[in-house]
Amino acid sequence: MRMFLRPLLVGYRLHLKMLMRSSFDGLLGLLWPLFFALVAFFMFRAGAGGDSLVFASFGAAVMGVWSSTSVPAGAAMQRERWQGTLELLVVSPTPFAAVLLPVTIAMSTIGLYSMVATLLLSRFAFGVDLPFESPGLFALSVVACVVSVGALA
């Protein structure tokens, strides 16, 4: 268990720092979700308006998760290839899941921020009332969505 948990925690911290320090990934994670939300809200407010703004806010949140997760995933793999460390990571004695999982979890953390920021923007900037029938199930589905998008990337 220790052979798996320590590389997982160290790798998560390292990759999260790398994602936060990169100006491209940082701007992508901070600005693109808000851009998607603004475009979706202006389009829906000009068109159908009303109840459809709720769907626009959730759609923009998922688009933000996808953009802030998939682009850095490709960049992380490319960076490992360019630095020549991808082969070393694959053949290391550490379990392969403990090598790949920290990258996925770090990108999922950025994706989770993206979803929360988009939903907060829709609530406080546009006054969209987000109806949460069951907050516990909603939180569980958000985590499942973010982790699955992170795993796909």
Image (cartoon, rainbow, N blue to C red):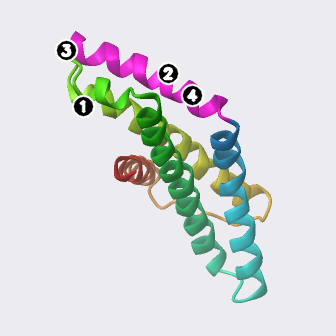
Instruction: Kindly report the secondary structure that dominates the magenta region of the rendered protein.
Output: helix
Q: Mark 4–mark 2 contact, CB under 8 Å? A: yes
Return the disc, 1 or 4, that comes first in the chain's sequence. Answer: 4
- Find residue 145 and report its horizontal and vertical position in percent: 40, 54
Query: How far apart are labels 2 and 3 at the CA level?
Result: 20 Å
Give the structural element (helix, strand or loop) at label 3. loop
Q: Which mark is residue 14?
A: 2
In the rendered image, residue 68, in percent from the top left (x then y), is placed at 56, 50
Could you tell me which secondary element the residue under label 2 belongs to? helix
Judging by the rendered image, the residue that carries numbered circle 4 is: 18
Please say whether residue 131 is visible from this viewpoint. Answer: no
Q: Residues within 10 Å of mark 4 (few under 14, many from 20)?
A: some
Residue behind mark 1: 97
Mark 3 → mark 4, Cα distance in angstroms = 26 Å
> Of 101 and 147, which appears nearest the observer?
101
Res 1 label: 3
Quarter of the rendering containing residue 60: bottom right
Looking at the image, is mark 1 or mark 3 earlier in the sequence? 3
